[in-house]
Image (cartoon, grey):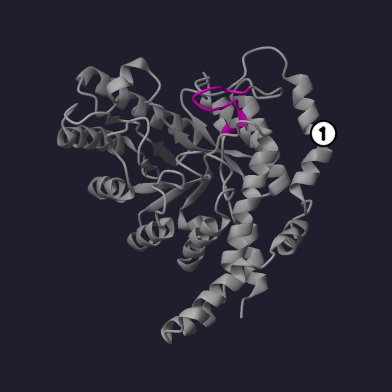
Amino acid sequence: MTDLAAVKRALTAQRIETPSWAYGNSGTRFKVFTQPGVPRNPEEKIADAAVVHRFTGVAPTVALHIPWDSVDDYAALTRYATDLGVGIGAINTNVFQDDDYKLGSVTNPDAGVRRKATDHLLEAIDIMDQTGSQDLKLWFSDGINYPGQDDLRTRQDRLATALRETYDRLGAEQRILLEYKLFEPAFYATDVPDWGTSYAHCIELGERATVCIDTGHHAPGTNIEFIVAFLLRQGRLGAFDFNSRFYADDDLMVGAADPFQLFRIMYEIVRAGALDPSYGIAFMLDQCHNIERKIPAIIRSVMNVQEATAKALLVDRDALFAAQQSGDVLESNAVFMDAYNTDVRPLLAEVRADSGLDPDPIAAYKRSGYDEKIIADRVGGNQAGWGA
């Protein structure tokens, strides 16, 4: 029998980090569609993130992307965020946009380019020191397009060298989150293509190096919840980048394509006792809202994670374990599916009301007039967006 009071406490304690870049303009390779009211600077991105937290109650931190969110005074930016009721989360590096990185960043054949890229990673740790951030999130687009273009093993050596220098610069409470991606923009071989490669480098570095799972970075049919279970067992799951995919790295709203997959992932988190923030897993969104309004889409994404989590918490673990131990395949699946098929929206409405929040965050946001306000106020200047 599921303890509903315990479920409510777990949902109240849940934390989901939103990304600064999701509030700006984004698009596909073909077009970036601009929107009125989009932030023009990091402060306005943080202001929007604070609004998401105000209506959901579970999104108290915002991740920054450097240099997209570069400012002269990071301590002042941190104070600004604190005044709005949010904090600075993970610091994300960018070693994929400069022309110098055409053949790679930390794995580039040119030692000068490798030095430039590694210096950027170290700069990001300096920013962490100023903002109080504990997480350095690394994603490398490095790879090759053609067989023979570069030496695969040597590129791994170069990667390991850069990671070691970066890891050794970390403060005592800071850690690396090493993300992986199957392909793109490199198409023949990516230098960190899968969780196994990320995991191996993390093991080599030390206990403060952990794997970040981006749910859109896998081949079709990949059993992501198995990866989650394995990394939890090894104590090396550091973070998620939640989004949704139909074909490749679509970066759509989490739970949009396969909400059942999101439920299965969150069940492994719940089963391991890893939902509580004290466990140390950063649950982050990594999405690009290309045609939909930014803030409502992010609120909806947060709610999707909450709904999957609530269903995972409702799995009758005792009944499931008993059915599994007896070898009752159908009963095991039935117990699992009963939780997934539960309408948890009334439960989450109660949780929000108990916390003094509106039971329907989307409706509350629409009534707030914030969308109309930012459209009217944010006129002039350059809008923030990809590369801005």
Residue 299's spot in the image, x, y percent?
67, 44
Left/right placement of residue 110 relative to residue 316 reads left
Query: What's the magenta bit mostly, secondary-structure-wise?
Result: loop
Q: Residue at x 70, y 39 (%)?
A: 296
Q: Amino acid at mark 1?
A: Gly
Residue 372's spot in the image, x, y percent?
80, 28
Q: Which residue is mark 1?
A: 369
Q: Residue at x 59, y 53 (%)?
A: 305
Residue 139 found in image quarter: top left
Residues in magenta, as a range: 22-33
Q: Is residue 288 visible?
A: yes
Q: Is residue 58 visible?
A: no
Q: Residue at x 23, y 17 (%)?
A: 112
User: How many numbered discs?
Assistant: 1
* Residue 34 vertical placement versus 198 (above, below): above
10 Å crowding of disc 1: few (<14), some (14-19), many (20+): few
Left/right placement of residue 68 relative to residue 226 reads right
Secondary structure state at the residue bearing disc 1? loop
Q: What quarter of the picture does the N terminus occupy?
A: bottom right
